[in-house]
Image: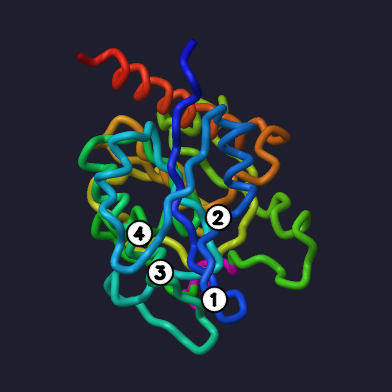
Amino acid sequence: MRLPPLVGLPTDSTLQGHHRFLMAGEKYVRALVDGAAVTPVMLPSLQPALPAGDWLGRLHGLLLTGAVSNIEPHHYPGGQTWPGNLHDAARDAGAFSLLEHALRIDLPVLAICRGFQELNVALGGSLHPRLHRVEGLHDHREDSAASAESQYGPAHSISLVAGGWLSHWHGSRSAVVNSVHGQGVAVLADGLVAEAHADDGLVEAARSHRHGFVLGVQWHPEWRVTHNPFYHAVFRAFGDACRQRQRLQQDSP
């Protein structure tokens, strides 16, 4: 009997009192266990980044999580910051290093919210730093005063691209998702193809056409993953890709 696949996820560097702590949101860890049936492995984000190749060869997948911080603006064209905009240079360094090696060895990757933005930037795309200030785009931010249940509740519909992974898994061309982000894709990177759009045209999901399983989504499917069939389908497909990777690694001479 095979043990569950090992899936790495980067940590966020957060100042608590006088000291920095490396942590990951429990909802992502729980979604990997309950939604993908894999074993999470938290990977420390340091600056400079630790050699990612030393870890990834032992893992079967990579989950890039959301975070309270935004990517530092110097990483992409048109980037900007403002007072109160949180950054995490260690997370940037770790995530981009992990992505570089994961894509090189064709490791299954699921990228959520900030993770999707990291994927797009790593491949040469750009972001809207403040979606709510872009003419024609909606305000995709959550109500900061609302409860978590409200913030992560259904917010808007998305259209799923015909013939894409998401429409196939969902069995429909539309879905309703939460919306908890202030930034989003401006220019989609070469190598990524759109999987879903919001009704204002914003790219809500994309996959790589150059790799076996590399998918980014702008919403948060980790939230109560087993209670939402669409969200669960995303994590189940990722888990299946990780199990396939595990079989290939264990069966290779």
Residue position for label 2: 24
The answer to the question of whether label 4 and label 2 lie on touching residues, with beta carbons closer than 8 A, is: no
Q: Which mark is residue 19?
A: 1
The amino acid on which the numbered mark 1 sits, given as a three-letter code, is His
Residue position for label 3: 71
**Element type at marker 1?**
strand
Q: In the rendered image, is residue 201 in sight?
A: no
Rendered location of residue 127, percent (x, y): 38, 67
User: Of callouts 2 and 3, which one flags the residue occurring earlier in the amino acid sequence?
Assistant: 2
Q: CA distance from mark 1 to mark 3?
A: 22 Å
The amino acid on which the numbered mark 3 sits, given as a three-letter code, is Ile
Q: CA distance from mark 2 to mark 3?
A: 16 Å
Answer few, some or many: residues within 10 Å of disc 4's Cα (few below 14, many 20 plus, some between 14 and 19): many
**Element type at marker 3?**
loop
State the image quarter where residue 213 is shown: top left
The answer to the question of whether label 3 and label 4 lie on touching residues, with beta carbons closer than 8 A, is: no
Residue nearest the observer in this picture, 106 or 9: 9
State the image quarter where residue 209 is shown: top left
Residue position for label 4: 94
Image label count = 4
The answer to the question of whether label 1 and label 3 lie on touching residues, with beta carbons closer than 8 A, is: no
The amino acid on which the numbered mark 2 sits, given as a three-letter code, is Ala
Is 246 magenta? The answer is no
